[in-house]
Structures are given as C-alpha cells and as structure tokens.
Image: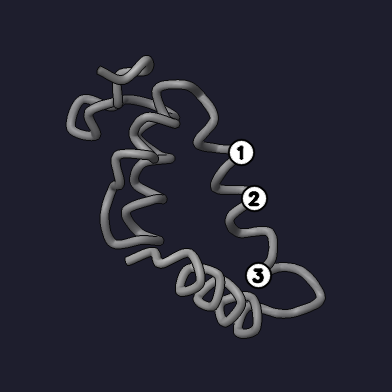
Amino acid sequence: MPRVTPLDPASAEGRHKELLEAVRAALGATLNVTTTMARAAVLEGWLGLNGAPQNGALGARDAKRIALAVAETNECS
C-alpha cells in the first residue's frame, strides 16, 4: 500500500489538473509516479527539473540524446 495515494487525473482540479495535463502532453500518458507526485505537491518541481536540460547550453536535441542514453543504461522502457 503506497504511503501517498495517487491523484486520479479524472478528478483533479486547478493547478493539479494543469500539471497532469502537462505530463500527458509531454509523455503521452499520465504515469503513476506523476499522479503520486501531484498529490504530494512535488510534480511542479519535477517538471521543472525534467525540462531544465533542454534550456541549457546543450540544447534540446543533445539533452534528449543524453536522456535516452541514461534511460537505456537504467533499462527503462
């Protein structure tokens, strides 16, 4: 049983709904980890950290390549 109950995207309101919609737009799905972060009020920070490398000196294309390499190394699907 999780310590923090995930927020149901269908019942989300206000800022929580906006953030979950941003996740769906970026990832194509609303992952369980993101619905849990939305309930715990850390999703906005995670989205900011997730998007930060694309705005840095590397550029979006290289940041995406690095993210894909890390995901492959970590055996993420």
Mark 3 in CB contact with mark 2 (< 8 angstroms): no
In the rendered structure, which amino acid carries the disc numbered 2? Answer: Leu
- For label 1, the residue is 45
- Tell me what residue is drawn at x 40 percent, y 39 percent: 18
Q: How many marks?
A: 3
| Circle 1 Cα neighbour tier, 10 Å, few/some/many (<14 / 14–19 / ≥20) | few
Left/right of residue 9 with respect to residue 62 in the rendered view: left
- For label 3, the residue is 54
| Mark 3 or mark 2, earlier in chain | 2
| Mark 1 or mark 3, earlier in chain | 1
- For label 2, the residue is 49
In the rendered structure, which amino acid carries the disc numbered 1? Answer: Gly
Residue 17, given in percent of the width and then of the height, sits at 34, 34
Residue 36, given in percent of the width and then of the height, sits at 37, 29
| Residue 17 vertical placement versus 47 (above, below) | above
Mark 1 in CB contact with mark 2 (< 8 angstroms): yes
- Tell me what residue is drawn at x 54 percent, y 30 percent: 42
Secondary-structure class at tag 3: helix
- Residue 12, numbered circle: none
Residue 9, given in percent of the width and then of the height, sits at 24, 34
